[in-house]
Image (spheres, grey):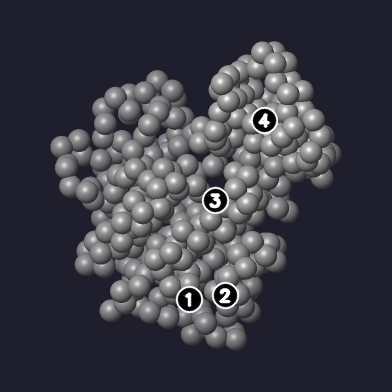
Amino acid sequence: MSNSPFVLIMAGGIGSRFWPASRENLPKQFLDITGEGRTLIQMTFDRFASFVPVENIFVITHENYKAQTLKAIPDFNPDNLITEPSRNNTAASIALGSFKLFKMDPDAVCIVTPADQIIREDNEFQKTILKACDFARSNPCIITLGIKPTRPDTGYGYIEFDHDDESPIRKVKSFKEKPTIDIAKQYLKTGNFAWNAGIFIWRLDQILEEFKIHAPGIYSVLEKGMNYYNTILETEFILSEYPKTEKISVDYAILEKAENVYTMPCEIGWSDIGTWNSLFDISEKDSDHNAVLNKPVYLENTHRSLISSSHSKLIVIKGLEDYIIVDTDDCLMIIPKSDEQEIKALKEKLKDLDLGNYL
């Protein structure tokens, strides 16, 4: 039985809510969003490489992002890169990675993580993950990390668990969609809800069994490749068969159907950096509570706003409150923070107006 887990980093998303910094040809996981000098995917790789052997860390991404992935993580072994020929959502990605890794070590535990999250408490994160791995190794279950909410956030899905359960790893009662602000306040008040971090821990044999039961439209397609995975015939099989898998998220395909799902509520300094508001929340603020990510910037009578610029020109702002201002080489976006969830829809409108080259 394996003691060192596998890590599968999911890096195929296009970061549509982080436009205009994140583009379809260079999504946010390959950007230094925080200004710390490392891309988000490099930070994720480094976080796990501190306690998992690098040969056990794999990345799955769209084939269009192969070069960006290898450039973003200089220490990464190219043989551990799994590329998808089509965008078939997270369930298919996870199933493909799980089949490959299961063939390498059928007894292993696997940690599945997005490539584009921020975690500030590395030591606490490591302890939490290793505890979850120990539990998963000896229990037939799925574990999803739950983040103890610090505010009533409408941008995350929530995990409900039993209010009276005091154990560190708790049975999940239900998964909740992104709530309205009133419902989010209620979740925070009752205390038995956590944000869904999208970080999963399970044994590979267990998750493949769940796919077999709950997602046959994915399992039946990819199971045919067991003789090909980790051989020279693998690429040909994936190119031919992977696009046939059902397009569905792992949340809908597995987590909401499986009966043995647990969560581990934790405080690890987590942010999914899924939106400009989430970046604003974790960024340093000036005396007027503005987050200025790049300089030079001159602000006057401006409060609680985020200003991000990709170059060195001076930005002057007067009289704005609660705004997001993002200036890239070819696009300037100025939008109220309260309208941030509409960025995705705005992109669709731009596409309809033949402005798709800016997306």
Q: Quadrant of the C terminus?
A: top right
Q: Earlier in the sequence, mark 2 or mark 1?
A: 1
Disc 4 from disc 1: Cα separation: 39 Å
Q: What element does badge 3 sit on?
A: loop
Q: Earlier in the sequence, mark 3 or mark 2?
A: 2
Residue on which disc 1 sits: 55
**Side of 72 where 221 appears, left or right:** left
Q: Earlier in the sequence, mark 4 or mark 1?
A: 1
Residue on which disc 2 sits: 77
Disc 2 from disc 1: Cα separation: 7 Å
Determine the residue positioned at 40% across, 62% down.
Answer: 111
Tell me the tag on residue 307: 4
Q: What element does badge 2 sit on?
A: loop
Q: Earlier in the sequence, mark 1 or mark 3?
A: 1
Q: Residue 263: give x, y in percent of width and height.
A: 29, 49
Q: What element does badge 4 sit on?
A: strand
Snapshot quadrant of residue 352: top right
Residue on which disc 3 sits: 116
Q: Does the residue at mark 1 contact the one at mark 3 (Cβ under 8 Å)?
A: no
Foreground pick, 14 / 2: 2
Disc 3 from disc 2: Cα separation: 19 Å
